[in-house]
Amino acid sequence: MKPTLSQIVSESSRLVFFGGAGVSTESGIPDFRSEDGLYRMKYDVPPEVILSSDYFFSHTEEFYRFYRDKMLPLWAEPNAAHKKLAELEAEGKHIDIVTQNIDGLHQKAGSKRVFELHGSIHRNHCLRCGALYDATYIAQSKGIPRCSCGGLIKPDVVLYGEPLDGETVEGALDAISSADTVIVAGTSLTVYPAAGFLNAFRGRHLVLINRDATPIDGRCELVLHGKVGEILSAL
Ligand code: APR
């Protein structure tokens, strides 16, 4: 008899929640590859090209026009998924969040142990002097955001063609390899190296919560196709 999600969660001592853009769609932020996803929208230049390191440096003004328009949902609030995870952590459950998202909603909900594999819109720094700027500064800037020293400001978001942050990767892999349960949610698992980190899992329960099928459905103990906010809030 398959265990239920709540049985798995309650018997787990070290949980990892491995999430993607589908965790934030119930907060009103479109994901990337669904029908209404960002990468399905028609642009002269494909968004995956705009969100690349080369394009950032070669077409900085166009990069920021797209980035301010599509990548800064500062109005978004944590949804039931973010809140339940933060609640479980506050109740003493050992939960590490490994997220591909850059929206900061897990922290906004109160989660403390968050590994942001692709960085965060809330951290931006001057490439010349290292000064830090928040997302509001970028959202309110015009044209190319400049530091008071005149340097170019860059978001601490992993653009296509850039490496992930070593410390974050180490922490995420350590969490996954020592977890007894990993819940994978709201991700198509199509982007590497992030998707490959799940190979570090050696624990007992691998759970998938995703609206659409993913490449790992076949090797999960429990597969729940539905809305992650609804499913987690029922815990
Ligand atoms: N509940 C559960 N699953 C959902 C929900 C929801 N409310 N909304 C969407 N999904 C699922 C979709 O079915 C889809 O499989 O979430 C998945 C989102 O997949 P993607 O749009 O590919 O997002 P993600 O996997 O996070 O993309 C990874 O791609 O461009 C890069 O850096 C970007 O971090 C991103 C990475």
Image (tube, helix red, strand yellow):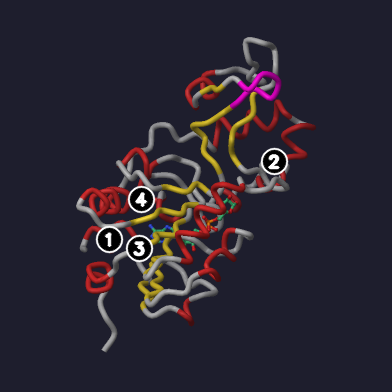
| Of the image marks 2 and 1, the number of the one nearer the N terminus | 2
Q: Is residue 44 left or right of residue 122?
A: right
In this rendering, the answer to whether 123 lies above or below 207 is above
Residue type at tag 1: Leu
- 2 vs 1, front mark: 1
- 3 vs 4, front mark: 3
| Of the image marks 3 and 1, the number of the one nearer the N terminus | 3
Q: Foreground: 55 or 110?
A: 110
Q: Is residue 153 left or right of residue 45?
A: left
Q: How far separated are the C-alphas under marks 3 and 1?
A: 14 Å
Name the residue beneath numbered marker 4.
26
Name the residue beneath numbered marker 3.
15
| Of the image marks 1 and 4, the number of the one nearer the N terminus | 4
* Mark linked to residue 232: 1
Q: Note whether ligand 1 is within 8 Å of mark 3.
A: no
| Of the image marks 3 and 2, the number of the one nearer the N terminus | 3
Label pair 2/1, CB-CB below 8 angstroms:
no
